[in-house]
Amino acid sequence: MTTKLSNAQIAWRAAQDIQDGAYVNLGIGFPEMVAKFKPDGREVIYHTENGILDFGEAPAAGEEDWDLINAGKKAVTLNPGASFFHHADSFAMVRGGHLDVAILGAYEVAENGDLANWSTGPGSVPAVGGAMDLVHGAKRVCVITDHVTKKGEPKLVKKCSLPLTGVGCVTTVYTSLAVIDIVNSRFVLREKLPGMSVEELQAVTGAELVIDGPVKDLIVPEV
Amino acid sequence: MTTKLSNAQIAWRAAQDIQDGAYVNLGIGFPEMVAKFKPDGREVIYHTENGILDFGEAPAAGEEDWDLINAGKKAVTLNPGASFFHHADSFAMVRGGHLDVAILGAYEVAENGDLANWSTGPGSVPAVGGAMDLVHGAKRVCVITDHVTKKGEPKLVKKCSLPLTGVGCVTTVYTSLAVIDIVNSRFVLREKLPGMSVEELQAVTGAELVIDGPVKDLIVPEV
Amino acid sequence: MNKLSSSVEAAVADIADGDVVMIGGFGGAGAPIELIHALVERFRKTGSPKNLTVINNNAGNGAIGIAALLYAGMVAKMVCSFPRSTDPKAFTDLYLAGKIELELVPQGTLAERIRAAGAGIPAFYTPSSYGTLVAEGKPIAEFDGKHYVQERWLKADVALIKAELADTKGNLTYHMAARNFSPLMAMAAKVTVVQASKVVEAGEINPEHVVTPGIFVNRIVEVQNPQQEEVLLREGVVA
Amino acid sequence: MNKLSSSVEAAVADIADGDVVMIGGFGGAGAPIELIHALVERFRKTGSPKNLTVINNNAGNGAIGIAALLYAGMVAKMVCSFPRSTDPKAFTDLYLAGKIELELVPQGTLAERIRAAGAGIPAFYTPSSYGTLVAEGKPIAEFDGKHYVQERWLKADVALIKAELADTKGNLTYHMAARNFSPLMAMAAKVTVVQASKVVEAGEINPEHVVTPGIFVNRIVEVQNPQQEEVLLREGVVA
């Protein structure tokens, strides 16, 4: 019995909800993994903040063009139909609501959709990048995350304790235990691991899980 | 003795003050004539609102490409080094202060630099085009105009009676009788026709002409 | 993902009564004549779409393109900077008869309001029109000792634009100065419909030369050898 | 009109103490390494320019480019969105020691503030950062029921950027995604200095392919086979 999904499995689950023809921005790091699990037959067009639409996989080692990188500064390639544009146009795509999906990591998500994912508080060098823009504008703002912190504390909470990235911006959370939509400032449970009861899930969630419609089994292949 | 300059002569005079390498927007109609009198050896780059830098003369009849027009919808040609851009970038050039000179016509110019050149008041179809943008941003906003209306009324006035195009925006006025800078909300006389006294000029001017420095003779060849 | 429409008729089939329609072009340069005329034909056959708000720099010339929309009686409101042309009768008669609404917007403000809509900027400040009739009723603010007018974004339900090349993913290039407002309108409309002189496979346009990225384009129809408004005008054509 | 500089040294010779300097590039893509290093060399020889405010998406990596400016002690303030990199020691040490000021700006807001400066827009509203620490002290306004933060334009004395082609009139193209902030910075600075991999005659760049029109460019210097920050980093180069 699966007790929790691996990061790859969370990424796989999030990838299944990306529709054919979607324009998608994947945050730096963990969210980049979602691209690996695009279902066959779907065409997904990836946007990167630094000004590329429709980039592809990493080039072979030694084949990099360092003017052809993604927001994480990793070398990428181009798909047929790619385009380049400057940063203001790139964020016009973001802020203007032209992306279908943005997928981000999180430190905390609050039940009203508040997201904290850029700062763990004072003491380090603050760095925000494009996250505060990405949480506004995409039609679906999705978070992929472990359900709890390494210490076992809930990451889905009533109110974020860390500095916010955006207010009321998250639409769906894909966790290691569940899929949860945020509707009218409530966590609405859509899917959970089949071996887990709602009560068990509630016990590791920092705000009320609302049941509104069927709760499906969260079944993900080994990936 | 010249009693007043022709339109071509006013345009000639204005053209002499356009420096080598200047980026210039010439308003539709009379101001377009200024391009004819560019002094030899100077390179002037013309901007048109609809998205061309460095356009050239009209093509021969029958050679027009109607996707290659200026703001007056007249067919033009391109100089080497021309570029195309969309309307927001075109007006970024205007509003952002990147043009060296804009030359416009006028119904009235007030001593504080107010310009009225877009509407003769109610009763007709109002049309403003790019004039309200052009009066902001160019380093020099110049007006070329007859010194008086067809009825002999002053066009240089204390306060405009017609709807304004812009507030305090005009820097220099080239008229059929004089060259006048606007400095600290006053008309400062720089040049006048040699056959005319300051008093005679004042009599056809609707606000005080200030003398601040030498007043040169306005001498223009037959053109 | 398939953005290709089978015909200009299909491409404009779902434009509805009361829609706000941006139409690319500056005078005849970039005017999507075939898309506009397909809309006029649809109205003649079905009585719809009507009560349109049309956004364009101008307000039609002669009896074709936007002027044909006006003569057909499909337009309730024009948003433009310069409702004059060599033959502005279509608009002028409606306007002077009080049968059409006009929102007059300075050209640079029009371009920037459309871009702002596309870029998710609900409002911005411009020096243009400060102290004039056009600014009446708009918020004013002072920055660094100078006065500016607050302007709002300008969105549309549909944009009709004309491109030179389109690839199958919707990436566009434009011919000469035909681009003018079109790249901005493509950003600002819920649905952007493009007539392209040639449709090519994805990958055939150099990514560095793309002017409008495909993300801003929903529907493409190939119109080879498109009509040019200025040529039609000179030939006295009536749509 | 002559925009050509004889050398990178000549091109950066008049940058003054206290200047606000925009530097193009996102990480290493588009970073004008030769112009930056010419500035560092000048400082080592003359002690000037110093107390610079540097605007870039990042805050240097390793010991070259912007990191070299930081190690040299020429920078009083960084304006950026992401002062982290694979080797951010140059900035981190200064920051944690309180020896450099940081203005942290969300990436899209940074791009838009720079564009606004170039476009004569003194302020605009964005949803980005509303309700966060970054918005503290900034005016808030509501449009159509949603809250937005007012942001101001961001200008510079000088922009240092890297282009692929420049013609003699200053028209520019960029290689791949190297353009990023550079077309915006070229608009927003009083003086824009360009290092181009190749300088061609006016007319050799297709007018439809120009990305930065020459009106935004003041000074051009040809730097053939320019260094690429990422390659230097991997080689462990120290400027």
Image (cartoon, coloured by chain):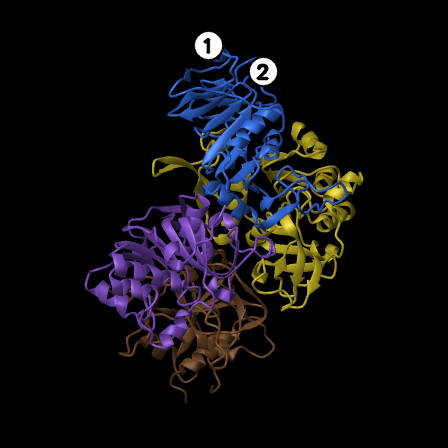
Chain colours: A brown, B blue, C yellow, D purple
Q: Secondary structure beneath disc 1?
A: helix
The answer to whether B86 appears left or right of A190 in the picture is right
Please indicate whether residue D89 sits to the left or right of residue C208 in the image: left
Who is closer to the viewer here, C94 or B29?
B29
Q: Position of residue A19 (x, y in %)?
A: 56, 70
Q: Is residue B118 visible?
A: no
In what quadrant of the picture does the N terminus of chain B appear? top right
Where does residue A51 sit, x and y in percent of width and height?
49, 63
Asked if A32 appears above or below A115 in the picture, the reply is below
- Residue tagged by mark 2? B2
Q: Residue at x 61, y 61 (%)?
A: C171
| Callout in the foreground (1, 2) | 2
Q: Residue flagged by tag 1: what amino acid is it?
A: Glu
Tell me the crowding category of disc 2: few under 14, some 14 to 19, or many 20 or more residues within 10 angstroms, Cα based. few
**Residue that appears at 43% across and 54% down:** D5
Q: Is residue B66 visible?
A: yes
The amino acid sitting under disc 2 is Thr
| Quarter in which the C terminus of chain B is drawn | top right
Q: Residue D82 location in percent, x, y? A: 34, 64
Q: Residues within 10 Å of mark 1 (few under 14, many from 20)?
A: few
Q: Quadrant of residue C66?
A: top right
Label 2 resides on the chain identified as B
Residue at numbered disc 1? B199
Q: Quadrant of residue D206?
A: bottom right
Circle 2: element type: loop
Q: Residue A76: x, y in percent?
A: 49, 74
Question: On the picture, is C137 further left or further right than D36?
Answer: right
Asked if the residue at tag 2 contacts the one at tag 1, i.e. Cβ–Cβ closer than 8 Å, the answer is no
Q: What residue appears at the point 40 percent right and 43 percent down from the top-left corner? A: D122
In the drawing, does residue C43 fall left or right of residue D166?
Answer: right
On the same chain, marks 1 and 2? The answer is yes
Q: Chain of mark 1?
A: B
